[in-house]
Image (tube, helix red, strand yellow):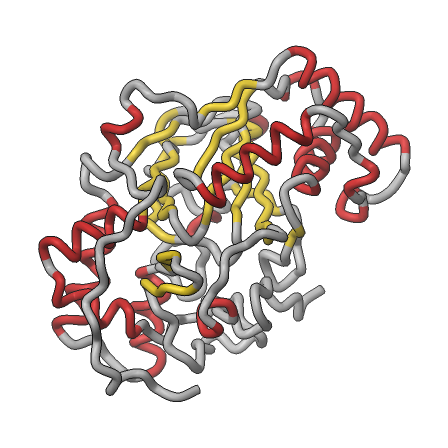
Amino acid sequence: MASNDNIPFKTPAPATGPDVWYAADFQTDTSWLHQFTEADIAEIEAAMAHAIGTGKPVTEMTLADFPLPTVAAKIDAAVREVEDGRGFVLLRGIRLPDYSHDEASILFWGMGRHIGAPISQNPSGALLHTIEDLGNDYGGNNVRGHSTNARLRPHVDPCDIVGLFCIHPAKTGGLSTISSAAAIHNEILKTRPELLAPLYRGYRIDYAGKGPTDSPDLTSPQRIPVFSSAGGRLTCYYNAKQIERGAEKTGDPFGDRDRAAVLAIEETALRPDIQFNMGFQTGDIQLLNNYSILHSRTDYEDWPDTAKKRRLLRQWLNVPTGRELLPEVADRLGTGPRGGVNPYLA
């Protein structure tokens, strides 16, 4: 792929639209919280029972196996808000303590089929992944942050929408923190516009064990822009750890402006006026747009009882109405446009 290093950079206009927001916008606005009614829950439980009756393994269940005659429209509205609105919603009201782990998995999987198509999340080909602390070191090579209890840096996931289903919240901490990528872009444009050129140029990223092979030092062959525009929409693809490790593994260390640009994203995302904190309750389902929302997590303390430890289920989903992406952004994992992690261990 040809380098764009020598193409003159034209300073962009500020991003506009409903996905440009600040934390203060939600001090009194709770329209992002979608509460299921008793009738909704009854319909979801009936769909779960129908899916169980098929006898299929969970990840082989289809949209037809999880019929939602009226709730489907509410899920569609939530997806439209995630795709074309502020970029996030929280679905609340699932009576999770009433279900076994298998039933909860079927419920979340079935609702996911009304959102989009799942993609692989790890080399084992997992389509429904459990997020919990496995005692790993967040700073280790190819260690993925969700397997630790550490604070996660602001980042995006390689899919259109990430869905998280809270099975158990932490004893303390573990808040989901989200920030508007467009607001971050506009703040950098306003205060440090010279940093936008390297961010639009992009970086070769560390695949962190998620690439097309199992090589521990594999990086993307192409630069992947942090900010880009296609189809008239601002898109963000950012993971500071992968960018920093990519520079190390390619032997192409950062210059001062590159380092400042990458850190400016993180610093801005964590500003109190930018960052919106969201606590999870048991049964909550969070949906985030991975091109307009940066997400992170505070560190947490788990319960001594392992049966109560913090545990989430996650799906990476691509939606039929997904936005247009630059080719280098679409092929961020080297597995094809909007491809998931290559399941080379499956």
Q: Residue at x 42, y 64 (%)?
A: 230
Quarter of the rendering occupied by the C terminus = bottom right
The answer to which image quadrant residue 245 occupies is bottom left
Whether residue 311 is situated above or below residue 325 in the rendered picture:
above
Q: Nearer the viewer, residue 300 or 99?
A: 99
Q: Is residue 58 visible?
A: yes
Q: Which residue is outermost to the right?
A: 54
Instruction: Name the spot of residue 52 as percent of width and height, x first.
Output: 84, 32
Task: Report the number of discs.
Answer: 0
Whether residue 339 is situated above or below residue 271 in the rendered picture:
below
Q: Is 138 situated left or right of 194 in this image?
A: right
Q: Nearer the viewer, residue 317 or 173?
A: 317
Q: Is 257 situated left or right of 146 in this image?
A: left
Instruction: Name the spot of residue 89 as percent of width and height, x first.
Output: 47, 32
Q: Is residue 136 visible?
A: no
Q: Residue at x 29, y 74 (%)?
A: 201
Quarter of the rendering occupied by the N terminus = bottom left
Q: Residue at x 46, y 70 (%)?
A: 207
Q: Nearer the viewer, residue 310 or 259?
A: 259
Q: Is 26 situated left or right of 316 in this image?
A: left
